[in-house]
Amino acid sequence: MSQETDRAKAIRLEREYRDALKAEADYNLLDPLRGELAETYRRILQTDPDNADTLTALAVLLTTDVQLPDGESVELLRRVFDMDRADEDACEALVSLLEALSEEEEADEVYRLASEAGNLQATFELAARFDERGDLEEAEPLYRRAAEAGNAHAVANLAALLEERGDHEAATALRNGEGARPS
């Protein structure tokens, strides 16, 4: 009989763990499964340290309701994010964890780095964060950049921002599809 590979073992354990969570299994069943799965992920990472899927899976596992998010989870997701800062999923996973830890400034920095790497969703999200804080001078150029790239939410938010500022003509032009040009 052949020995199960770590990747095959991880797939089997992921399924068992997911099924146990769905069944609302008791901690005494979940904890050992979680531990075995974490160790399997760590073995995979020993031979393939830049495996983004495994890094992400381990980070997510470490942030389940069984355990509160921790520094290791942030570090794992930061490694995945640093591999490709334009990747929307990596950015969103890291920002979600940082927000859960109330690390708002770090979340802004992740969005800024992702935006600079060409992640237009991050550009929009960063603009929205500035907008929510009332920092319209920071929000406007970010909304404009995302709107110019075709982000419909950015177009709507930029038009609303222009409207609030009293620039009704520019807001109307923007809503009529005449672009996100400077007013």
Image (tube, rainbow, N blue to C red):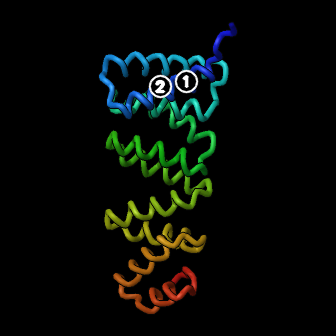
Q: CA distance from mark 2 to mark 1?
A: 6 Å
Front one among 40 and 103: 40
Residue kind at label 1, given as amino acid type: Arg
**The label number, if any, that marks residue 12 in the structure image:** 1
Report x, y in % for residue 36.
47, 16
Report x, y in % for residue 78.
52, 37
Left or right, residue 14 beside residue 3 = left
Left or right, residue 10 beside residue 71 = right
Q: Residue furthest top?
A: 1
Q: The N terminus lies in which quarter of the figure?
A: top right
Residue kind at label 2, given as amino acid type: Glu
Q: Which residue is mark 2?
A: 16
Report the residue at 54% width, 47% height from top.
89
- Count residues near mark 2 (Cα–Cα under 10 Å), then give few for <14, some for 14-19, many for 20+: some
Give the vertical position of 29 relative to 83 (above or below).
above
Looking at the rendering, which quadrant does residue 158 occupy? bottom left
Looking at the rendering, which quadrant does residue 73 occupy? top left
Report x, y in % for residue 111.
49, 52
Q: Residue furthest right?
A: 2
Report the residue at 51% width, 84% height from top.
174
Considering the numbered disc 1 on the image, is that residue within a helix, a strand or a loop?
A: helix
Front one among 154 and 169: 154
Give the vertical position of 40 relative to 98 (above or below).
above
Front one among 36 and 159: 36
Q: Are marks 2 and 1 in contact (CB under 8 Å)?
A: yes
Instruction: Judge whether residue 171 can be spotted in this image.
Output: yes
Report the residue at 45% width, 86% height from top.
171
